[in-house]
Image (cartoon, rainbow, N blue to C red):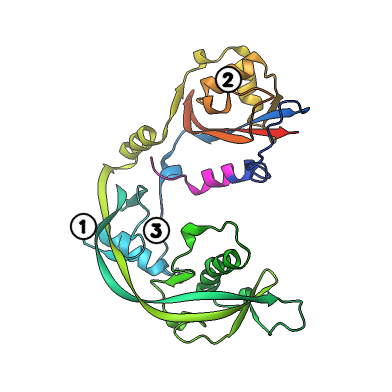
Amino acid sequence: MPSPSTSRRAFLGATATGFAALAGCESLRPDSDRRVEYTLYVEEHGDSLADELLWKPPEPDDDRPGQTGRREAWEAATTGEAYRTYGYPAVPDGEYTEREGTYYQLHDVVSGSERIDRWVLRLSWVGRADDEETSEATPREALPELDQGAVMPAYFAARAERYGGGAPWKYIEQGGYVYRNADPAESELIPDPEHEYVSVHGAVLRVEVSRETLVEPEHTAVATQVATGDAAFERVADAAGVEVRLEPADFDAEAADLFERAQFDGGYVDTMPLATGFEDLLRTLGLHDALGCSVEKCESKMAETEYLAFDGSYYDAAVYVRVED
């Protein structure tokens, strides 16, 4: 299925506030006085999924770093021309898009590799900004947008090297950040750094930039036509997006009431042992993964339904399990 739309990501992000701090709770003490709370959120999206599933390319005048190349890739793919990038996806793989009334699904295909010279940014830990002996540093926020995005992965890499522990490794390459699809005119760090030190979250780090030869995977943008006209794409969106299909007959009076209450701000909350009607509703919504544990042996978690179709409308449904010892 295509990746979540912007509004769907916002829905999931908003309902997950505070939940991330719970995920990683390892306490499963069977003798503790535990409270297990379930919160069900439901959001209606109306009678169409077309806008939810459509990815829109950057506008022609979008001058943010990398956006021009993304639009060029989209234009090439939707006209049957080859467009290649190296080291990063040409287009968002799996997304649907529309151009002049014709709808396509975009694909990012790895089609080879090339040896290419890239600038690589690495940061090394110096100390804390509030330490009198620490050198003056340029705040990350004072850098151009291109460099602000580059500094964060390099910062995480430097922090992990200094203190150990985790880091968002999927954003870290070559021990820092690799500049790709980047115009040096938009940077103060490449090709020759204008700043010796930068500061991030109160830490001061030394800037190191080098030119290195990397073996970069070649990505080719491809677009497959899936529909002509809005009505045809509505059928595509329905087929691609809906995970659970329900009819009014699938809900008894209690389930219908709980489903409606879950659409209010704050969702619908129940605690274990769950009411039978609430358990039945979660199964009906396809949220089985949230069930099956006991008060003594349960962990904080989340389960969601991609999209569900019910009585002529589309919905998101997500349940969050919160464990308190």
Q: Nearer the viewer, residue 262 or 157?
A: 157
Q: Earlier in the sequence, mark 2 or mark 3?
A: 3
Q: Position of residue 75 (x, y in %)?
A: 30, 61
- Disc 1 on helix, strand or loop? loop
Mark 2, secondary structure of its residue: helix
Q: Viewer-nearest of labels 2 and 3?
A: 2
Q: What residue is at 42 percent from the left and 64 percent from the top?
A: 59
In the picture, the quarter occupied by the N terminus is top left
The residue indicated by pointer 2 is 281
Q: Which residues are magenta?
A: 1-12
Give the label, 2 or 1, closer to the camera. 2
Q: Which residue is mark 3?
A: 57
Residue drawn at point x = 54 percent, y = 66 percent: 157
Residue situated in front as seen by the camera: 88 or 121: 121
Q: Earlier in the sequence, mark 2 or mark 1?
A: 1
In the picture, residue 278 is in which quadrant?
top right
Instruction: Read off the residue under disc 1.
Output: 80
Q: Secondary structure at mark 3?
A: loop
Q: Is residue 2 magenta?
A: yes
User: On the picture, is 116 further left or further right than 42?
Assistant: left
**CB atoms of marks 3 and 1 within 8 Å:** no
**275 left or right of 107?**
right
